[in-house]
Amino acid sequence: MIIKKSKLVLGFVLLMSALLIITGCGSSKTSSDSKDTKVIKIGYQKGNTLNILKESGFLEEALEKDGYKVEWKLFTHGGTLLEGIYSKSIDFGHAADGSGIFAQASGKPLVYAGADAPNPEGVGLMVLKDSGITSIEQLKGKKIGVLKGGNHHYLTVLALESVGLSADDVQWVYPEDAAQGRSLFETKEVDALASYDPFFAGIETELDTITFTENKDYGYPNRTFYYATPDFSKNHPDLVKTIIDAIDKSDQWANENKDEVTALLSKALGINEKIIAKAVERRTYGATPITQEIIDAQQKQADKYFEIGLIPKKLDVSKDMPIQ
């Protein structure tokens, strides 16, 4: 009798355990499904337009009526953010034009979902005033520091070509990041440096420099882009539009409140407000869907990257740039 009773108790315990496991799995699946369909995961970097959008709350307002929540994920730079796009750990994010070209060249899955307004003054090529170099022509055979494939690298190639030089006429030095680039420049280990805001603004503010590209039109808009996973872009075009509209709303607020933007970005980046103010004041914020004009500029840049050996094959950038 004791054995039979023990078997009954054991059987009851096993049955209840099985029911709890089944119930638990069912609850987890429902919760997970609900989360997947109602949470939009957005990647941002400190100091960029999505950082401003995050602080504004405009996107949460726009999505609230449809029951969506926003999950913000911070990334250190555009390369790691795009890795989040490829792995689907985020649905949407923001990175530079060159980052998109390199991604397409390596066959990574992404879609260009929108673009920032042009910011041609946000990049520049400069020398120290006491270097003795007074023109772009004098850079022939000299060392120029750039982050390989960056927007400022592209600008420098265009500037060289504008005076009859080519990318092969100079020695390229590739620092690991903007801070190392500045160090090489200050210690004169490179003869010239190309950089991008806010680091470009910092060098202009704190060092005695000549900026060769200032107020010059090289036909380069210097746009950064909004990227989405192919699934998110295909399945939720309405949400993509809502996000771009919210970014543009936040950007228009930024144009009208540059002092507040300066304070916000200075705190986020830990950079002096005077430097951030210089970068903010020379920029016009704005976001737009992809247009043929934007595709043409990105194609021109991709063609140049192939021509100078930055990417291994010619690209048709339009295949990942749907016109909305």
Image: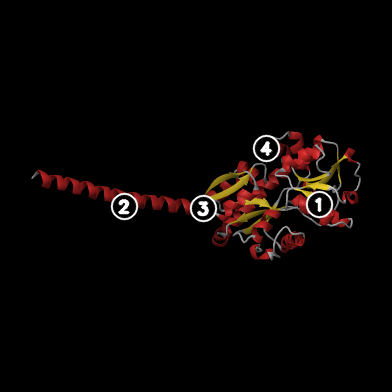
Q: Is residue 49 at least partly visible in the picture?
A: yes
Tell us which disc is closer to us: 1 or 2: 1
Mark closest to the chain's N terminus, 1 or 4: 1
Left or right? Give the position of 233 relative to 266. Answer: left
Q: Is residue 198 visible?
A: no
For the residues labelled 3 and 2, the Cα–Cα distance comes to: 31 Å
Give the amino acid type for the residue marked by disc 2 in the picture. Ile
Labelled disc at residue 269? 4
Residue under circle 1? Answer: 156
Check disc 3 and report the residue beneath it: 66
* Distance Cα–Cα, label 4 vs label 2: 48 Å
Residue 298: percent from the left, percent from the top? 73, 60
- Foreground tag (1 vs 4): 1
Q: Nearer the viewer, mark 4 or mark 3?
A: 4
C-beta proximity under 8 Å, tags 1 and 4: no
Residue at x 61%, y 59% (from the top left corner): 108
Residue at disc 3, secondary structure: loop
Picture quarter containing residue 289?
bottom right
Q: Which circle's residue, 1 or 2, is located before the other in the chain?
A: 2
As rendered, which of 178 and 36 lies closer to the eye? 178
Residue position marked by numbered label 2 in the rendering: 22
Front residue of 13/34: it is 13
Judge from the rendering whether residue 138 lies leftward or rightward of residue 100; answer left or right: right
Label 2 neighbour load within 10 Å: few <14, some 14-19, many 20+: few
Mark 4 vs mark 3, CA separation in Å: 33 Å
Task: Decide which of tag 4 and tag 3 comes sooner along the chain.
Answer: 3
Query: CB atoms at circles 1 and 2 under 8 Å apart?
Result: no
